[in-house]
Amino acid sequence: KQEVTQIPAALSVPEGENLVLNCSFTDSAIYNLQWFRQDPGKGLTSLLLIQSSQREQTSGRLNASLDKSSGRSTLYIAASQPGDSATYLCAVPTGIQETSGSRLTFGEGTQLTVNP
Amino acid sequence: GAVVSQHPSWVICKSGTSVKIECRSLDFQATTMFWYRQFPKQSLMLMATSNEGSKATYEQGVEKDKFLINHASLTLSTLTVTSAHPEDSSFYICSAWTGAQQYFGPGTRLTVT
């Protein structure tokens, strides 16, 4: 059974810092990995999707890397801003070789607070 | 981009009553939708997979007679919580599959008193 773990559970940083969020998964036979952002009481916003054949994806100040063999992914946020404050979730397809249209298993998230 | 809506955004109901939550894909057709539940300070847990025109597939431990799912059209799936109890109070989020990616709704906050 696929399990996803995120470290740290919470993180508080001053504005402007670069930071790294970590995600690990138990079954490395994944089709892809996604990072989401969730604001309090809201739904999910997809940030980055990395296919299994890719090692990283970038969008603006965000960079996500994927190391399938070690079962790890990192989300790097450069020059953090107060508006980045949210919970960040990573997710992988639940079953082996399932496609991105399938059920997702989520980590418990990292709650990020960026202080002005 | 693809938009998924949910209605209502929040609902309060009395214990023993039923409540229906709608999930709509606004600008695309979705043969598959998913329903997730999120308890406070916890992550999303998949409840069921909703397939248009067929019965939903429930995850282990989810009572199909309590959480009724109907996917009658390519743009609408509904989740009905029957005989709700306070422990059913949670944040319910749906997602819709475009054929290439999942898009999530804004969620529905259910409080059972």
Image (cartoon, coloured by chain):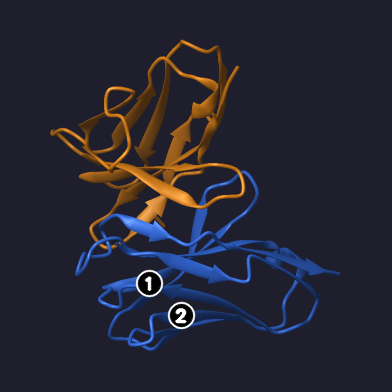
Chain colours: A blue, B orange
Subunit of mark 1? A
B109 w.r.t. B104: above or below = above
- Residue closer to the observer: A38 or B61: B61
Type of the residue with mark 1: Leu
Question: Helix, strand, or loop for circle 2?
Answer: strand
Left or right side of A100 for A114: right
Chain to which mark 2 belongs: A
Q: Are marks 2 and 1 in contact (CB under 8 Å)?
A: yes
The reply, left or right, for residue A51 in relation to residue A111 is left
Alpha carbon separation for disc pair 2 and 1? 8 Å
Q: Kindly identify the amino acid type of the residue bearing the numbered disc 2.
A: Ser
Give the residue pinned by disc 1: A33
Q: Nearer the viewer, residue A45 or B29?
A: A45
Say what secondary structure mark 1 lies in: strand
Looking at the image, tell me whether mark 2 or mark 1 is earlier in sequence order. 1
Q: Residue at x 29, y 47 (%)?
A: B28
Say if labels 2 and 1 share a chain: yes
